[in-house]
Amino acid sequence: MQPTCTHRFDMMKSYKVTRFGSPLEEVDEPTPVPKATEVLLRVVACGVCHSDLHIWDGHFDLGGGKQMDLSRGILLPRTLGHEIVGEVVAMGADAGDLAIGSRWVIYPWIGCGQCSLCKAGQEHLCAQPRSIGTSVDGGFSDHVVVPHPRYLVDFGNVPVDVACTYACSGLTAFSALQKAGPVTPTDPILIIGAGGVGQSAIRLCTALHGIGPIVADIDPAKREAALAAGAVRTVDPNDPEVKRALLKSTGGGFAAVIDFVGAASTAEFAMAMLRKGGTLIVVGLFGGSVELSLPLLPLRSINIRGSYVGTLDELRELAELGRDGKIPGIVVAGRPMAQVREALEDLRSGKVAGRVVLHTEDI
């Protein structure tokens, strides 16, 4: 039995990392033919994420001159891009009856499907990932293959430029907020970093809890954007008076701090802002290390945990909130897919407020 198809299988254009740290190469290659449960989608929109930069570089900065080498786990050439809205153009014989032309957000954090984590719905933590845009080719291309239709999530009438960001920046912010617990006027949350993911978290916090967070960022423009997104207050963490003022206004610190930067300086600031029994949730991957006085962990009873993207069920829950109009949009700058190299460089240099989303055509 042949795959169901109304699409002409010819050549597709992709932008690939062929050598870590070198410019992405434009590659013309045959359009894949989906098999079994696979679904082939035309890429409509694909967000550009900071993790794309780390993968492009080929390492994460662990601090102290140490690096996490990604070359063993990521085989080149590789097409990056994991925040994808795609349009179904073909499917394998066992993929069901998806409508050709239907559009979906793709859940990219796919695991092996067999380990205990995958079976518990924690595919994003799988030790043998098949993640789209990292382990397998992603959305900086005309087309992308998804291994099963269960990874396609309905986004309703949400604009595609916003919907694609649900797959990473939205999901990452949503999952981190779920770990932070309730937010009230007398028990606010502190968010560090008002970049793309931080902006999503600010809007989600306001939408979910009815009150915005307090936001710390060294960039005045990002602090202004955070206020526009719903933050109740913004501060410059480099201000020598800020720590004392925040500790006083909160009665001893925050119950939860989410660090969307993940640098040594932001982690140190975050730990100083925790009250006894508080929780630091580290999300950002900027890099570095901190010195930790171990006796302070039990004496202050603080918790330090990481949060990495989120589950498929969380993405479905987030998309449902979006379909119901409960999530305000984020600042998005659309660009043609051919400008992917420039988009990555602008992101690296801090020129991006919100999210850059690449298009394969006018939408």
Image (spheres, grey):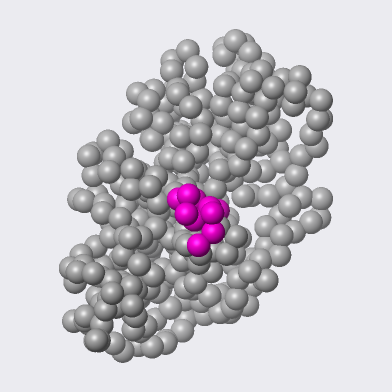
Q: In front here: 206 or 23?
A: 206
Q: Is residue 359 left or right of residue 124?
A: left
Note whether residue 235 is visible: no
Residue located at (67% from left, 25% from top): 302
Q: Provide residue 163's location: percent of width, then percent of height.
A: 31, 52
Residue located at (34% from left, 73% from top): 38
Q: Quadrant of the C terminus?
A: bottom left
Residue located at (63% from left, 13% from top): 252
Q: Quadrant of residue 228?
A: top left
Q: Is residue 165 left or right of residue 262?
A: left
Q: Provide residue 103's location: percent of width, then percent of height.
A: 24, 62
Q: Quadrant of residue 115?
A: bottom right
Q: Is residue 118 magenta?
A: yes
In the rendered image, the vertical position of residue 319 relative to residue 259, given as above or below: below
Q: Which residues are magenta?
A: 114-125
Q: Provide residue 90's location: percent of width, then percent of height.
A: 26, 77
